[in-house]
Amino acid sequence: MRVAVTTTRRPDPCEEARAKESAGRHGLAFIPRGDSSLEAARSAASADGLLVLTNEASTLVLEGKAHRWFPGMAPLRVKWLRRHGTSPPATRRDPFLRACDFVEGDRVLDATLGLGADALVAAEAVGPSGEVWGLESVAALAAWVAEGLRRYADRAAPRVRVERADHGAFLEALPPRSFDVVLFDPMFRDARKAPGPFQVVRRLADFRPLDPQALAAARRVARRWVVVKDGAPGWDLARLGITPLASARGAHLYYARLPPAP
């Protein structure tokens, strides 16, 4: 899908300059909006969609529908984390945190970024001395999420670095033990009802199943472990021969944790 960057009508000079800079960062065309309609801007760019950037928001416009980036339940999860910390009793409520068992200062690679919700939670868990890299292979999603995080008013957001990349090739190119934790959250084979932004991810994301070769590369890259998420009943974990961690009865999500390669 081809996406171009624009602004709202008649933006101030600083806002337009910032949007133009964002377009250059992602290798996307920038279309000055002026007083034209979104459809006119899209047509001028010969694009399938538009990424409309303001100082406050990153909005992806597809087929006339505007989708403002928002990290799902991440704000509530981050709030809980700040209130209760990362000790095992406190993380009982968040199976992602239990599975990852982050340590202050960790370097985390989220190999399947999606909306960036888990990456944002991880960024809070690893603290100011840690960092999170998020990989997204689809240009439109990478730009939408990256610019949303840049405009998101939360202290953890700047710790998330978004890279447009295929995770298989990216992992193969990394030196051994270069990240503490590597995360995989492949798209679930069974679609469940989800908020609007996640439906955009479902529409545009790469649906290839997690490849054993990528998993092996992740284990080479990880210093502590690789964490893989799957939707119940865990068909992809079973396909990969991975045993999930114990979970609550009726859980919709399963997590597995693999050690680094010897």
Image (tube, rainbow, N blue to C red):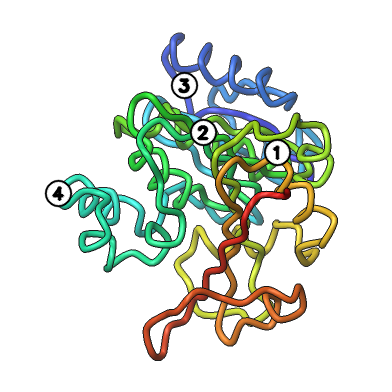
What residue sits 49% from the left and 76% below the top? 253
Query: In this figure, which residue is indicated by the disc labeled 4?
Result: 83
Marks 1 and 4, how far apart in space?
44 Å
Residue 237 shows in the view: yes
- What residue appears at the point 66 percent right and 49 percent down from the top-left corner? 260
Comes first in the chain, label 4 or label 3: 3
Q: Disc 2 vs disc 4: which is toward the camera?
A: 2
Q: Amino acid at mark 1?
A: Arg
Q: Amino acid at mark 4?
A: Arg
Count of numbered circles on the image: 4
Report which residue position mark 1 lands on. Answer: 42
Q: Name the element at disc 2.
A: strand
The secondary element bearing badge 3 is classed as loop
| Front-most of residues 20 and 90 | 90
Question: Would residue 62 appear left or right of 47 to someone viewing this image?
Answer: left
Of label 2 and label 4, which has the lower sequence position? 4
Mark 1 lies on a secondary structure that is helix
Q: Which mark, residue 107?
A: 2
Of 251 and 57, nearer the camera is 251
Give the crowd class for mark 4: few <14, some 14-19, many >=20 residues within 10 Å: few
Foreground label between 1 and 2: 2
Q: Which residue is mark 3?
A: 10
Question: Does the residue at mark 3 contact the one at mark 2 (Cβ under 8 Å)?
Answer: no
**Residue 257 pos. (x, y %):** 56, 62
